Image: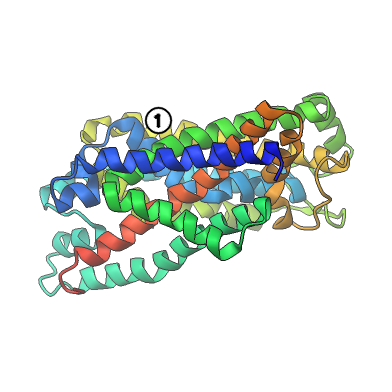
Amino acid sequence: MSSNTVLMIAAIVIYLAFMICVGVVTSKKNKSSDDFYLGGRKLGPFVTAMSAEASDMSGWLLMGLPGLALMTGLAEAVWTAVGLAIGTYINWLVVAKRLRLYSEKINAVTLPEFFSKRFGDGSNILSVIAALIIIIFFIPYTASGFSACGKLFGTLFGMDYHLAMILSAAVIVVYCTLGGFLAASTTDFVQSIVMTIALITVVGLGAGAVNGFGAVFDNVKAFDGYLDVFKGYSVADGTVGSYGALPVASTLAWGLGYFGMPHILLRFMAIDDPNKLKTSRRVASVWVVISMGVAILIGVVGYSLMKEGIVPAYESASAAETIIVDISKYISGKNAFFAFLAGVFLSGILASTMSTADSQLIAASSSVLLNDSIR
């Protein structure tokens, strides 16, 4: 194992150790089940905003979106991002304050409990249905996050996939078990910062590898439709097609999913002051727009890196999802500082996955453990 690889691993280990420390510290603030599963409604506006968005974006922000932009041009990536940005803003505007006020009024800690009490369901049928839906769809979703962590370490360092997955899952389970919702929210806040640093630094270093953004856009301008949001371009076969009203509408519709995501809605319920939700809405909306914009730009930069032979020649958007990993590998070979920095980038990918997995774990577990009908 080279010294550069050791430095990359060291950066990731430091990050994981810090996450566990957060769990230990926040565990001291949990005095009841309400504290454990909803943080005692004590979240500040910035933690509420950033933890909600970090838990939503998952590895898609640092892997899926750049890979999509790289292989298909701007159309699909941009319209998807626009739909998500609109959905984010409307969710905060319409749902957040109402849910926060009403959930406290009826003393509901989980969403299943909220539905049951809100509609006077004495039989708890609504509560059971809501809890089962969360369990059925969130446990596999959480498991996919653990799997992504395993694949990341397995691909980078040649670790056994199952061992890497178990170790990653263990870290998430430990700090969630220690600190509960407050630990998940606090770590998600930290993870959103790590993700932001990774996005901005990667796009800068990636552009620098091909002599700046001028060279980047010169490379893509040569291909008709790549930068046109109303044309669909395929890097794999070089074809260009129109991106009309139906594809635009379908990609914009991604934003509709926000209104039913339990791990986001729980953040609305947990803020300490409902009047601070306006600040949270602004912070969340700005971060979402900037982060997705930079992620798309990484895809465009990645195309130039691919043409220059700095990263592999990808054959599909799913293959191109490793663009940040491949950029990290490239810069890690320069010197010790860049090797450690590459470890920070990879921690960003890990952060994006963990921030979703921990929130889903809390949402799923609270739906079961606080639901008397299921127990």
Secondary element under disc 1, as helix, strand or loop, is: helix
Q: Nearer the viewer, residue 307 or 124?
A: 307
> Which of the 4 quarters of the picture holds residue 344?
top right
Q: Nearer the viewer, residue 118 or 31?
A: 31
Q: Nearer the viewer, residue 271 or 142?
A: 142
Q: Is residue 96 left or right of residue 330?
A: left
- How is the model colour-coded? rainbow
Residue plotted at (40% across, 30% down): 282
* Above or below, comparing residue 18 to residue 59 in the picture: above
Across and down, in percent, residue 348 comes to 55, 40
Quarter the C terminus occupies: bottom left
Q: Nearer the viewer, residue 294 or 334?
A: 334
Across and down, in percent, residue 235 comes to 82, 51
Across and down, in percent, residue 66 comes to 67, 45
Give the amino acid at mark 1. Answer: Arg
Across and down, in percent, residue 45 comes to 31, 32
Number of dots carrying numbers: 1
Q: Is residue 370 visible?
A: yes
Residue plotted at (81% across, 38% down): 305
Q: Which residue is mark 1?
A: 282
Q: Residues within 10 Å of mark 1 (few under 14, many from 20)?
A: some
Q: Is residue 349 left or right of residue 35?
A: right
